[in-house]
């Protein structure tokens, strides 16, 4: 399993639009991938405190635990590509992306 962490940097004045689009388009993909055992855990968190969010930006923490196959399949999924193309237009700053294999975890 891979742990994937992405900080999405959405224009604050378009955050509601992003969240509605995410709920309508990405959540059904998550449901599909979880049902097929490709994703184990997924969450999108609206950042409300902490680090270094620039003025006019609403940061989100996207966290996914996926099989390597699931990660690759998701990145090539036509539904995701369609969503991503439009979602990127709401992001004035590039996302920060990390992934790797967990070395410690508790559930």
Image (cartoon, grey):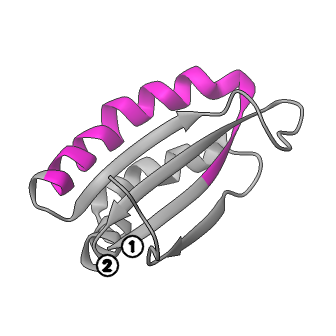
Q: Which residue is found at the position 77% from the left and 51% from the top?
A: 93
Secondary element under disc 2, as helix, strand or loop, is helix
Q: Residues within 10 Å of mark 1 (few under 14, many from 20)?
A: some
- Can residue 81 be seen in this snapshot? no
Give me the C-alpha separation between circle 1 and circle 2. Answer: 6 Å
Secondary element under disc 1, as helix, strand or loop, is strand
Find residue 105 and report its horizontal and vertical position in percent: 41, 63
Q: Which residue is found at the position 47% from the left and 77% from the top?
A: 103
- Can residue 76 be seen in this snapshot? yes
Q: Which residue is found at the position 43% from the left and 32% from the top?
A: 21
Q: Residues within 10 Å of mark 2 (few under 14, many from 20)?
A: some
In magenta segment, residue 20: yes
The residue wearing badge 1 is 2
Magenta part of the protein: which range? 7-34
Q: Is residue 77 above or below residue 54?
A: below
Find residue 4 and report its horizontal and vertical position in percent: 48, 64
Find residue 1 and report its horizontal and vertical position in percent: 32, 74
Left or right: where 98 falls relative to 91: left
Q: Are marks 1 and 2 in contact (CB under 8 Å)?
A: yes
Left or right: where 86 falls relative to 91: left
Q: Is residue 59 above or below residue 3?
A: above
Left or right: where 77 falls relative to 16: left
The residue wearing badge 2 is 68
In magenta segment, residue 23: yes
């Amino acid at each position: 399993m891979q742990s994937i962490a992405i900080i999405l940097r959405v224009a604050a004045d378009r955050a509601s639009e992003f969240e509605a689009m995410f709920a309508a388009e990405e959540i059904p993909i998550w449901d599909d991938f979880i049902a097929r055992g490709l994703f184990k855990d997924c969450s999108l968190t609206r950042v409300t405190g902490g680090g270094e969010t620039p003025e006019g930006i609403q940061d989100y923490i996207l966290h996914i635990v996926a099989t390597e196959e699931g990660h690759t399949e998701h990145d090539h999924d036509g539904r995701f590509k369609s969503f991503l193309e439009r979602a990127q237009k709401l992001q004035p700053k590039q996302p920060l992306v990390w992934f790797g294999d967990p070395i410690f975890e508790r559930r």
